[in-house]
Amino acid sequence: MKPFFRRIHLYLGLVSGLFLVVVCLTGSILVFEEELEHAFHRERYFVEAATGPRLSLAQLTAAVRAAKPKAKINGFKLYADPTRTVEVNLGGPGRPGGPQGKPRGAVAEGQDRPAGERGPGRRAEQAGPGKRGEGSQVGGPGKGGPGKGDRGPTLFLNPYTGAVLGEFNKQQSFFHFIEEIHRGLVAGRVGKLVMGINSVIFVFILGTGLVLWWPATRRALSTRLRVKWDGNWKRVTYDWHTALGFYSSVFLLIMALTGVGMAFDWVGKGINTLTHSPQQRPEPPTSTLPAGPAPAVFGADAALTLARQQAPAATSYTLQLPKAPDGSIQVGILRPGALTERATDDVYLDQYTGQVLRQQAYTEKPVGQRIRGLFKPIHTGAIFGWPTKVLALVVVLLGVTFPITGTLMWLNRTRKSRKKSVPRVAVA
């Protein structure tokens, strides 16, 4: 049976080896994307903590208007950390070819965004063929947050002075380019399809590799679990591929499976079916438009005050402003000890009266939605912070070597078989 699995393992490895090297290399860069961004652009994300009060959102809005008079503000993200800047997400030029003033439904802040998109009000675009991201499951046009075409840059403001400290456009960043290679080789839908299929192939490679690794005897087990560093290069190559491949296989399998989950719609639909979760998210609730030419609005500051009253110890608050006259204000509350940045409690408020239209804690969200929300942090190693990120970095760097060592083993075996097949000529 093993010769059959060996052939499958070999052929799949030869077909997808180069893709696996690219995926693991780019993945190793993306593991610490947030930390690297903060290190390279610290002035954008951090300020000196001041003793005075922070500016109100109205004052910060005025500061944005002064810097960018034509800017359209989609939302704010505020941190409890006194050294963090306030992130203000601006709207883009609008959805090309779409009707003006018809933004798509809002997605819960941080619920399905790729890592690195830290600006408030952004929607995910999970990698994969025919997939616009988990946010696409909202169910058509709605009254809530901005859609893809309404996404603009993020401004970073000093919360004490209102000074604009920087501007960031995810679509033009280095890490976005690396992510596009990782997800689809910068080749659009075709590239995403190729990489999605490659993730499926990787699952089979890991499965057949575990079958081939499994020792026949207990004595053989010890040799399969260590690298004989004092052996020749062929022995070291073999031990590296088998022993280190075994140690990292479980983690690589988890990454491959979550990669498949983010690449194909049918995975999310299957999880929703198995967990009896709805296939589409409900539309955001709407505000009741009062009579009169210019009704007073509840305001972002009042919404933030209400959120702080509900969760005074929250790590961060994210406000998405309504994009239509009957839209609602959405507040995402990240509580201390949350499993991931996506584990937010969501509150929808009437933009005129401040009435709570809908409130949903993270633990109350559908099981399928929560499982799919874990794909990205598990895939990148961000699920438990630094320890799992370091583990993910080590594993993906090892993953770069396995197609190389596997190819060397195949070439060595091929040379041996050729030498055996050459007939020896007797010398008189």
Image (cartoon, rainbow, N blue to C red):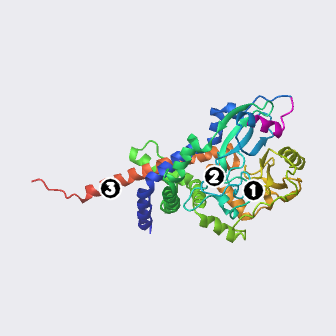
* Spot occupied by residue 60 in the image (x, y as percentages of width and height): 79, 37
Task: Kindly report the distance in space between the C-alpha atoms of the residues bearing marks 1 and 2.
Answer: 14 Å
Residue 84 visible in the current orientation: no
Q: Quadrant of residue 164?
A: top right
- Mark 3 crowd level (few <14, some 14–19, many ≥20, 10 Å Cα): few
Under circle 3, the secondary element is: helix
Report which residue position mark 2 lands on.
149
Q: Residue at x 70, y 38 (%)?
A: 155
Dot 3 or dot 2: first in sequence order is: 2
- Mark 1 crowd level (few <14, some 14–19, many ≥20, 10 Å Cα): many
Q: Quadrant of residue 118?
A: top right
Q: Residue at x 67, y 60 (%)?
A: 372
Q: Residue furthest left?
A: 428
Task: Kindly report the distance in space between the C-alpha atoms of the residues bearing marks 1 and 3.
Answer: 61 Å
Mark 1 belongs to which amino acid? Gly
- Mark 2 crowd level (few <14, some 14–19, many ≥20, 10 Å Cα): some
* Spot occupied by residue 2 in the image (x, y as percentages of width and height): 44, 66
What stretch of residues is rendered in magenta?
52-64
Tag shown at residue 414? 3
Mark 3 belongs to which amino acid? Thr
Report which residue position mark 1 lands on.
144
Marks 3, 2: nearer the viewer: 2
Is 419 situated left or right of 19 in this image? left
Q: Nearer the viewer, residue 334 or 327?
A: 327
Q: Are marks 3 and 2 in contact (CB under 8 Å)?
A: no
Dot 1 or dot 2: first in sequence order is: 1
Name the quadrant of the C terminus.
bottom left
Residue 104 visible in the current orientation: yes
Mark 2 belongs to which amino acid? Gly
